[in-house]
Image (tube, helix red, strand yellow):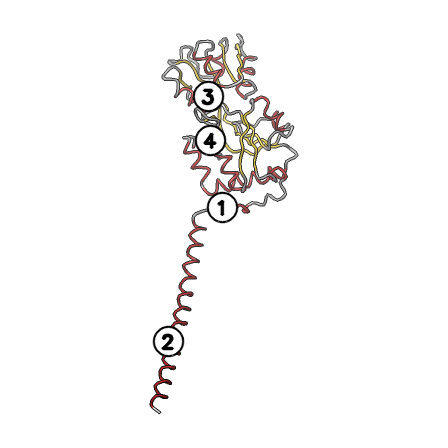
Amino acid sequence: MQPRRLRTRLLLLGALLIAGLLLAAACDDDEEEPEEAAATATTAAAGETPAAAIDISGVSELDDGTLTVGSDIAYAPLEFFEEGTETPAGLDVDLAQAIADVLGVDVEFINSGFDGLIPALNTDEFDIVMSAMTITESRSQEVDFVAYLNVGTGIVVPADNPNNIATLADLCGLTVAVQVGTTQETLVVDQSDQCDEPIDVVTFDTNPLAVEDLRTGGADANLSDFPVAFLDAQESDGALQVIDTQIEPAPYGIAVRQSSTALTAVLEQALQAIRDSGEYDQILATWDLESTALP
């Protein structure tokens, strides 16, 4: 009888041991679930934006997974090529990348002359134009715009401002270098019509060429968007200065074909998303252009 009792006790001990192990395993499972939930919460708190946050399923321009951007990449600090490379950089480039990230697509910049950007957009050479383009009434007749910055014109003059230029009216009778097709060309031509002695307006394919004409004495002043004028003066080794006052601040716009209504809608949503998240302000701060933020 004694051996049978011993076997019974051993069987009971074994059963208890197995039950304990099963209970411990169940407790471990319960403990892991909060950890997994915490990890998920941490990911969400990190501000990651899911690619599907904005529905782009009806946007045919983005079916290939890429937002193609036309730009005149010679307008630092808004768009330029990193030195010695074909890699675009600048404020517009960073904002376009942030918008593309929210939409869950890649972004590709295509370099093109400024005065041909809208015609090229309207012949489907790219999806949008993002190239420090001021929204004007005449341009709005050709394309739609999504406003993203607010920028005025700056006047660059030789150091010490020998002609005492402070306003557009002070350009009368002088030679002014500007990039062709820009708002600045229109400003100077309109001002010249009001002068007793007209302005000699000299146009160039790119703004750096216009600035070089000023530096070498071919022109008395150069006009460009204020952030560009400011940087040109900074990088002139003291040869140039920018007049402090911005002329006629106006919004920059992302240009979109008038037929691309679905694309315009998701661009507006994406821009609002990066403004709400604070990324918009961070990008402007990176380029010291907080003053150009939309109101």
Tell me: 106 left or right of 60: left
Residues tagged 1 and 2 counted as in contact (Cβ below 8 A): no
Label 1 or label 2, whichever lies nearer to me, is: 2
Mark 3, residue position: 154
Q: Counting other residues with Cα less than 10 Å from the Cα at mark 3, is it few (<14), some (14-19), or many (20 or more)?
A: many
Give residue 147's mark.
none
Q: Counting other residues with Cα less than 10 Å from the Cα at mark 1, is it few (<14), some (14-19), or many (20 or more)?
A: some
Residue 9 in the image, given as x and y percentages of width and height: 35, 84
Residue 227 in the image, given as x and y percentages of width and height: 45, 25
Furthest residue toward bottom = 1
Mark 1, residue position: 49
Q: Earlier in the sequence, mark 4 or mark 1?
A: 1
Mark 4–mark 1 distance (CA, rounded to whole Å): 21 Å
Residue 95 in the image, given as x and y percentages of width and height: 49, 35
Of helix, strand and loop, which one carries label 2? helix
Q: Counting other residues with Cα less than 10 Å from the Cα at mark 2, is it few (<14), some (14-19), or many (20 or more)?
A: few
Label 3 or label 1, whichever lies nearer to me, is: 1
Q: Earlier in the sequence, mark 2 or mark 3?
A: 2
In this view of the protein, which residue sits in the foreground, 74 or 264?
74
Mark 2, residue position: 17
Residues tagged 2 and 4 counted as in contact (Cβ below 8 A): no
Give residue 91's mark.
4
Q: Quadrant of residue 291?
A: top left
Classify 8 as above or below 188.
below
Q: Earlier in the sequence, mark 3 or mark 4?
A: 4
Of helix, strand and loop, which one carries label 3? strand
Tell me: 48 left or right of 142: left
Mark 2–mark 3 distance (CA, rounded to whole Å): 83 Å
Q: What's under tag 3, amino acid-wise?
A: Gly
Q: What's under tag 2, amino acid-wise?
A: Leu
